[in-house]
Image (spheres, coloured by chain):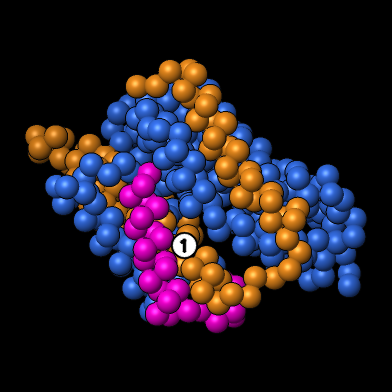
Chain colours: A blue, B orange
């Protein structure tokens, strides 16, 4: 089996991810400072976590003085999908990848890096992967820094408008697959209905936001995994 | 309100959990997960998580629920027609900005 192990090819494949990350992390930077975090706190979160959905869930918990347990459980459930990606990526690693390399690659095994690595014919080697993860990581960090600074200096009306950027991206991620799969669409509908219940039903409003994400997402996903399990071919586009 | 100590503890917990979730399977597990329920559950999770985080939170992310609803509608329509992430996000922001300028002009905000 051919092993892709060219650093420059990895770099080239990583640039589009880097550009995409820059804009998402810019929105994350804005979101962080509008939640009361400092520029450096936002940057440190991005440099150590490298996960969009997880970080977005973490910020209100951190800024609101939530418990460490709530934070740990939220991060675990929201990022659980990476476990499957890591399992899958481990099958794809070439002979050049050493044990020590796996510890580094795992740090930046994001949805997009995983998707690009999986799309290569043959296995992927250490040089290729290092090239692939380099610019997305830099883009993710730089975007956060610039977004957080912008959030502090731009007029309130512009920050208010930029605040929806990250939600716009989330919609752009979930709606196209929902169009193609009725079960995915229904799962999203159930998740949204549960989420609204926790927001508007008096007794349920007291549940911390981190747990609401976990409870709603796990309930909707488990329900659909039971009533509408997916075939392997369907999974690949996720 | 958060203190520096609390922030660094949070940073350690969030980064640690995220890293372990990614690292442990990549380093330890070499076999493929075959359990159909588990695979299906992991397939649905990202969509459900993003949906829960977007609705209804998006409607409270701007200066007015009206401008947010307009941004939401624009994002949903463009996503449906599979415009890229950047186009959808930028258009939603633009729609919110225009809506809030109009609301200001009308004295609603």
Left/right placement of residue A20 relative to residue B50 reads: right
Q: Tell me the SS state at disc 1.
A: helix
Left/right placement of residue B13 relative to residue A87 reads: left
- Location of the N terminus of chain A by quadrant is bottom right
**Most foreground residue, B1 or B80:** B1
Left/right placement of residue B36 relative to residue A27 reads: right
**Most foreground residue, B63 or A237:** A237
Left/right placement of residue A227 relative to residue B30 reads: left
Residue at 25 percent of width and 62 percent of height: A193
In the rendered image, the residue lying farthest to the left is: B107
**Most foreground residue, A71 or A172:** A71
Where residue A99 appears, as percent x and y from the top left, is 84, 49
Residue A228: in magenta span: yes
Where residue B35 appears, as percent x and y from the top left, is 59, 75
Looking at the image, how many numbered discs can be counted on the residues? 1
Report the magenta residues as a range. A210-237
Residue A90: in magenta span: no
Determine whether A5 is above or below B13 in the image. Answer: below
Q: Is residue B66 visible?
A: no
Chain containing the residue with disc 1: B
Q: In which quadrant of the rendered view does residue B60 lie?
A: top left
Tell me which secondary structure the magenta stretch mostly adopts.
Answer: helix
Residue at 50 percent of width and 30 percent of height: B10
Q: Is residue B31 visible?
A: yes
In the rendered image, the residue lying farthest to the front is: A69
Where residue B105 appears, as percent x and y from the top left, is 14, 36
Where residue A153 appears, as percent x and y from the top left, is 40, 22
Give the residue at mark 1: B45
- Location of the C terminus of chain A by quadrant is bottom right
Callout 1: 10 Å neighbours few (<14), some, many (20+)?
Answer: many
Residue at 34 percent of width and 73 percent of height: A186
Residue at 42 percent of width and 68 percent of height: A222
């Amino acid at each position: 089996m051919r092993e892709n192990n060219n650093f420059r090819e990895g770099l080239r494949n990583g640039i589009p991810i880097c550009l995409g990350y820059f804009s998402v992390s810019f929105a994350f930077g804005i979101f962080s400072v509008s939640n009361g975090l400092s520029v450096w706190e936002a940057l440190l979160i991005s440099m150590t976590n490298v996960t969009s959905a997880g970080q977005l869930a973490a910020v209100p918990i951190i800024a609101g003085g939530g418990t460490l347990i709530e934070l740990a459980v939220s991060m675990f459930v929201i990022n659980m999908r990476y476990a499957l990606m890591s399992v899958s990526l481990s099958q794809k690693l070439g002979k050049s990848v050493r044990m020590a390399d796996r510890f580094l690659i795992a740090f930046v095994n994001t949805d997009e890096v995983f998707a690009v690595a999986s799309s290569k014919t043959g296995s992927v080697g250490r040089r290729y992967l290092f090239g692939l993860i380099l610019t997305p990581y830099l883009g993710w960090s730089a975007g956060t820094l610039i977004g957080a600074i912008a959030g502090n200096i731009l007029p309130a009306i512009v920050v208010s408008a930029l605040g929806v950027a990250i939600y716009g991206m989330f919609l752009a991620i979930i709606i196209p697959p929902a169009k193609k799969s009725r079960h995915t669409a229904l799962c999203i509908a159930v998740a949204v209905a549960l989420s609204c219940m926790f927001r508007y039903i008096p007794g349920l409003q007291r549940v911390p936001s981190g747990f609401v994400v976990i409870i709603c997402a796990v309930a909707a996903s488990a329900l659909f995994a039971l009533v509408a399990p997916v075939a392997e071919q369907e999974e690949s586009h996720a | 309100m958060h203190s520096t100590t609390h922030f660094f503890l949070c940073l350690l917990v969030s980064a640690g959990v995220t890293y372990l979730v990614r690292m442990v399977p990549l380093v330890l597990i070499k076999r493929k997960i075959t359990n159909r329920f588990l695979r299906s559950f992991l397939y649905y999770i990202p969509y459900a998580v993003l949906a829960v985080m977007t609705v209804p939170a998006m409607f409270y992310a701007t200066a007015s629920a009206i401008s947010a609803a307009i941004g939401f509608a624009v994002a949903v329509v463009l996503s449906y027609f599979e415009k890229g992430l950047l186009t959808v996000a930028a258009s939603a922001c633009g729609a919110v900005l225009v809506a809030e300028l109009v609301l200001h002009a009308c004295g609603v905000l």
